[in-house]
Image: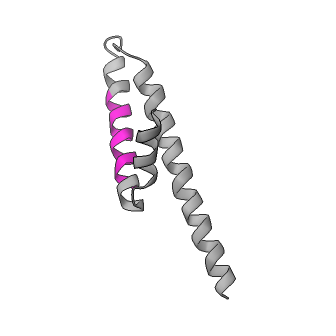
Amino acid sequence: MKRKDKETLKNMGDAELKAQIADLKKQIFQINFKRTTAPVENPLVLRTARRKIAMMNTWLRQRELAKSKTAEVKK
């Protein structure tokens, strides 16, 4: 994944990231479904999609932890 792509994904809001994750999961499901009947043209698509999902989940979790940490400091 290119640096620009990572920057744009990282700057997205939480709702947009969750929507992207849902789209990628749907894409992975469709590729796996097609793979049962015929070989996939580019199997690296699955790997990159899984890695994008993991990266986005990491960013969401980091934001969640940062919000909870600031809430604890305010108390």
Vertical placement of 52 versus 61: above or below? above
Q: Nearer the viewer, residue 34 or 2?
A: 2
Residue drawn at x 39%, y 60% is 13
- Residue 19 drawn in magenta: yes
Q: Where in the figure is residue 27, as x and y percent of width and height?
A: 33, 34
In the image: residue 56, left or right of residue 15: right
Vertical placement of 49 versus 22: above or below? above
Residue drawn at x 42%, y 61% is 14
Q: How is the image coloured?
A: one colour
| The quadrant where residue 46 appears | top left
Callout count:
0
Q: Nearer the viewer, residue 38 or 64?
A: 64
Q: Where in the figure is residue 34, as x and y percent of width and height?
A: 31, 21
- List the single residue furthest toward the front: 4
Vertical placement of 46 versus 24: above or below? above
Q: Quadrant of the C terminus?
A: bottom right
| The quadrant where residue 12 appears | bottom left
Q: Nearer the viewer, residue 34 or 65?
A: 65
- Residue 34 drawn in magenta: no
| The quadrant where residue 40 appears | top left
Q: Where in the figure is residue 44, as x and y percent of width and height?
A: 44, 20
Residue drawn at x 43%, y 33% is 49
Q: Where in the figure is residue 55, as x and y percent of width and height?
A: 52, 44
In the image: residue 31, left or right of residue 71: left
Q: Main secondary structure of the magenta part?
A: helix
| Magenta stretch, residue numbers | 18-30
In the image: residue 64, left or right of residue 9: right
- List the single residue furthest toward the bottom: 75
